[in-house]
Image (cartoon, rainbow, N blue to C red):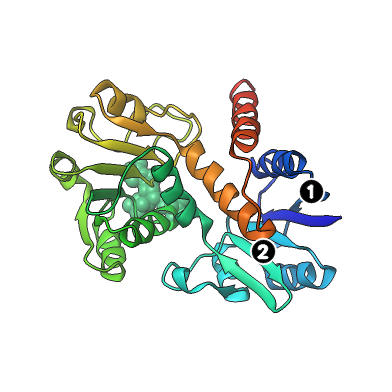
Amino acid sequence: MDVYGIIGNPVEHSLSPPMHEAAFRERGIDAKYVTFEADPDRIEEAFRGAEALGIDGLTVTLPFKHDAFEFADPDVQIERVGAVNTIDFTESGPVGFNTDMTGTLRAFEHHDVDLEGARAVVVGAGGAARALAFGFEEAGADVQIANRTESKAHDLADEVPDATGHGLDELPGLMADADVVANATSVGLESDESVAPADAWHGDLVAFDAVYKPLETRFLQDAAAAGAQTIDGAWMLLFQGVDAFEIWTGEDAPLEAMNEALRDRLDDDSQQ
Ligand code: ATR
């Protein structure tokens, strides 16, 4: 039997176990997906222990994505991102990936959104914004970063080739000329607020929200009301898991089964 898992702290409410269990079941792979709540002071030992125990792969969540980057050999693509959310324990050692980044790009592809040459605004400058900004840049988009603390937007923009940094006051102006707007702040998480003014939306935009609780955030509701296309945060979760599954097993992920398991769990959670 193969053993995979998610390591984080806290991790008990993770949506990854039902999604990966459904994938293994659907593909007839004899594997378990376990939840590991690691002690932040002993994270390096935890990674080494997982390797020594012969664990096959790990999903890494907060606050350990940078530790995972230090531990596992990052694949070249993510050297700049500085965060690893998927470890593949191979015969030649642990290899790190950032499927938050690659998965989000697949979520856009799945929705027929072409990022090549698109003007993409990332709102936020934390970990989620980093993955999105580097991902969009890699996909050929022209990236603009807007953040409440403007200096952090400039710091991130300095790292992403050709990106520009802005304060939130400039967001409406950026949106007027943009093709894609992505919320990578925590605004809207379990609240009815949006980081973007409702009247800044227009029908030529694609809105993506990394927040998935609730699924229909105020940000996405305002976007839809203005006729914009919307992509909710569950798609990012789904495709980061899809990419991880494919890295670990070398098989095509069962998209439908994973999506159903993920959305069932999100529905259950929202009814609690
Ligand atoms: P994560 O790693 O999930 O991205 P983070 O690093 O804590 O989380 O980043 C949170 C992001 O949400 C930041 O860009 C933060 O803006 P600041 O850099 O100014 O703190 C943004 N954010 C949080 N609350 C916000 C609010 N009420 N209005 C606007 N932006 C907010």
Residue sitting at 62 percent across and 30 percent down?
Answer: 260
- For residue 29, which numbered disc appears in the image? 1
Query: Badge 2 is on which residue?
Result: 40
Q: Which residue lies furthest to the right in this view?
A: 1
Return the x and y of residue 134 as percentages of the image width and height: 36, 61
First of labels 2, 1 by sequence position:
1
Crowdedness near tag 1: few (<14), some (14–19) or many (≥20) residues, C-alpha within 10 Å: few
Residue sitting at 26 percent across and 48 percent down?
Answer: 121
Corner quadrant of residue 37: bottom right
Residue sitting at 22 percent across and 42 percent down?
Answer: 179
| Amino acid type assigned to the residue bearing label 1 in the image | Ile
Return the x and y of residue 104 as percentages of the image width and height: 44, 49
Q: In which quarter of the image is the N terminus?
A: bottom right
| Amino acid type assigned to the residue bearing label 2 in the image | Pro
Is 221 on the left-hand or right-hand side of 3? left
Q: How far apart are marks 2 and 1 (CA)?
A: 31 Å
Q: What element carries label 1?
A: loop
